[in-house]
Amino acid sequence: QVQLVESGGGLVQAGGSLRLSCAASGRTFSSHAIGWFRQAPGTEREFVARISRSGGSTVYADSVKGRFSISRDNAKNTVYLQVNSLKPEDTAVYYCAADRGPLGRMEYEFVYWGQGTQVTVSS
């Protein structure tokens, strides 16, 4: 089991940057792939980025490619999402999620979720 806590959100002006953090409990953190998702009011949750268990593979949604960067520091049990060149349409609650890890048959089956951190971008 994994518990996740997001932090780093806030209110920024368009063009600004934030670094979101996803801190995880559990000694097997490095065995979990991690994804970032977001949900704006009145919309469905959407995929933002993911990183493999090893950190050697990353995938981004087209809407954030070139602006956002996902990374992980397994020694700190933390995954980061650096968000740059923010736009008002990036405003959402950002969630991180972990897959099943070593018990899973495949990566990116996200089953553990944090409570989210609010990112608000003003024009």
Image (cartoon, rainbow, N blue to C red):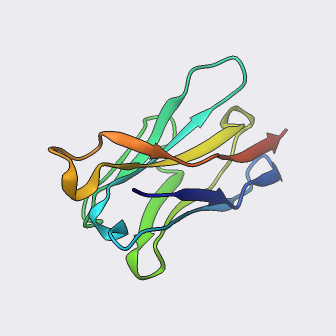
On screen, residue 67 above or below 79: above
In this view, the residue in front, 46 or 28, is 28
In this view, the residue in front, 34 or 59, is 34
Q: Is residue 108 left or right of residue 91?
A: left
Residue at far front of view: 1
Q: Work out which quarter of the rendered image holds the N terminus and state it.
A: bottom left
Determine which quarter of the picture holds residue 95: top right
Q: Is residue 59 left or right of residue 6?
A: left
On screen, residue 104 above or below 22: above
Q: Residue 10: percent from the left, percent from the top?
A: 79, 54
Q: Residue 46: percent from the left, percent from the top?
A: 50, 30
Q: Is residue 28 left or right of residue 123?
A: left
Q: How many marks?
A: 0
Q: Is residue 7 left or right of residue 48?
A: right
Determine which quarter of the picture holds residue 2: bottom left
Residue at far top of view: 42
Q: Residue 69: percent from the left, percent from the top?
A: 48, 58
Q: Residue 114: percent from the left, percent from the top?
A: 57, 49
Residue at x 78%, y 46% (from the top left corner):
14
Residue at far bottom of view: 75
Residue at x 39%, y 75% (from the top left corner):
74
Determine which quarter of the picture holds residue 6: bottom right
Residue at x 41%, y 82% (from the top left corner):
75
